[in-house]
Amino acid sequence: MKLRFARYLPVLTWGRQYDRSALTNDLVAAVIVTIMLIPQSLAYALLAGLPPEAGIYASIAPILLYAVFGTSRALAVGPVAVVSLLTASAVGQVAEQGTAGYAVAALTLAGLSGGFLLLLGVFRLGFLANFLSHPVIAGFITASGILIATSQLKHILGIEAGGHTLIEMVGALLSHLGQINPITVVIGVTATAFLFWVRKGLKPLLRRMGAGPLLADIVTKAGPVAAVVVTTLAVWVLDLEGRGVSIVGEVPQALPPLTLPGFAPDLIRQLAIPAILISIIGFVESISVAQTLAAKKRQRIDPNQELIGLGAANLGAAFTGGYPVTGGFARSVVLSQTPVERPCVTFRQAEFPSGVPDSSADRPAPLLKF
């Protein structure tokens, strides 16, 4: 009986070996990954058509649940670009963006995805991932990246442009070029160029200046946070909102609320197929990253248990104001390069975005939207 519980709850195995040294290493890893997580989660929520706080909510309970049920020590579970795009596409078919129905549909999508993954895991169907064509999945993810980049051009240019396909989006952008806001363009292009430079040039510069490897890595990973802070201060000090620069606005500073997905038969029927698609795409991406990183450290990944871990994570998102999640490539690679010891790092990672007071009425957060 004890072995059976340990099989479905990996935390019972590694938890017995957890010590102070492992805790110290995990805290360092959590700080580094959380620096990346905060701006990414805000941006991915907007990509999904949801309020920015939904990205933060989807980064707390899901990673806690994955730490209990998952088997990877380096997989960073949370909002990712492809799943966010698929969420916007699926939910946009059943509800209008910005309405309460849209948020409920996103919760329902996460619940359906979590339930589907959990069933696959319980029936030990993780081997099915071996039969999926990786070139097809890679092509799908690449195409999604092109759509994501194109969909964000309207925010950099400061114009209103819609569309669901690449042709529609490009056409809408071209037809609204006369509405470009020059200030928004300067901010967007400067921030984008800065992020590209941070990714390639900041770490070598810091190393040449004598900074240690760990410090240089942490400062480099803080690049997106610096971009958010500087642009937010610029908008506030120069009152750029009054000059046409669009901002995200106030982000609630509180723990995730307890939420309920929708149980209407029509809603479930409309979202069932998209939920299955999101589950498959998310699992393939997640298991590929987890197995690649585990092989480098001679660790073992159980695909069936990964299904259960991801299923639990998505169910957690459905009941805490989030939306579908999976293992992210960029954060996982960074996490694997830190001194992470156990999946407990995700417990520590979850403490940082959740450890904010409920004082949104007193401390607005004017985040630039681009």
Image: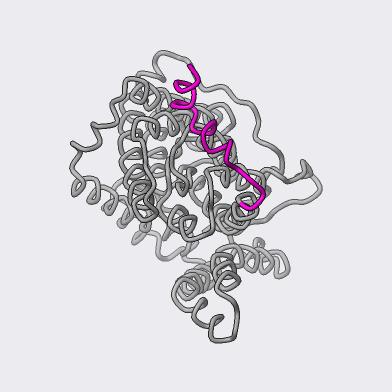
Rendered location of residue 131, percent (x, y): 18, 36
Q: Quadrant of residue 183?
A: bottom right
Q: How many marks?
A: 0
Q: Where residue 69 appears, x then y in whole percent?
A: 48, 31
Q: Main secondary structure of the magenta part?
A: helix
**Image point 79% across, 44% down: which residue?**
359
Image point 47% across, 59% down: which residue? 334
Residue sitting at the far top: 265
Q: Range of the magenta residues?
A: 1-21
Name the image colouring. one colour
Query: Is residue 361 toward the left or the right of residue 336 in the image?
Result: right
Does 230 sit left or right of 342 as displayed?
A: right
Is 9 covered by the magenta stretch? yes
Q: Is residue 359 above or below residue 256?
A: below
Query: Quadrant of residue 238 in the image?
Result: bottom right
What residue appears at the point 69 percent right and 43 percent down from the top-left corner?
Answer: 252
Whole-percent x, y for residue 75 in the image: 45, 47
In this view, 118 is above or below 206:
above
Q: Is residue 162 left or right of residue 195?
A: left
Q: Residue at horizontal 46%, vertical 71%? A: 199
The vertical placement of 94 against 169, above or below, is: above
Q: Observer-nearest residue: 44 or 311?
A: 311
**Is 39 in front, or is 200?**
200
Closer to us: 48 or 128? 128
Q: Is residue 195 magenta?
A: no
In-image side of 289 versus 30 (left or right): left
Residue 219, image x and y in percent? 59, 70
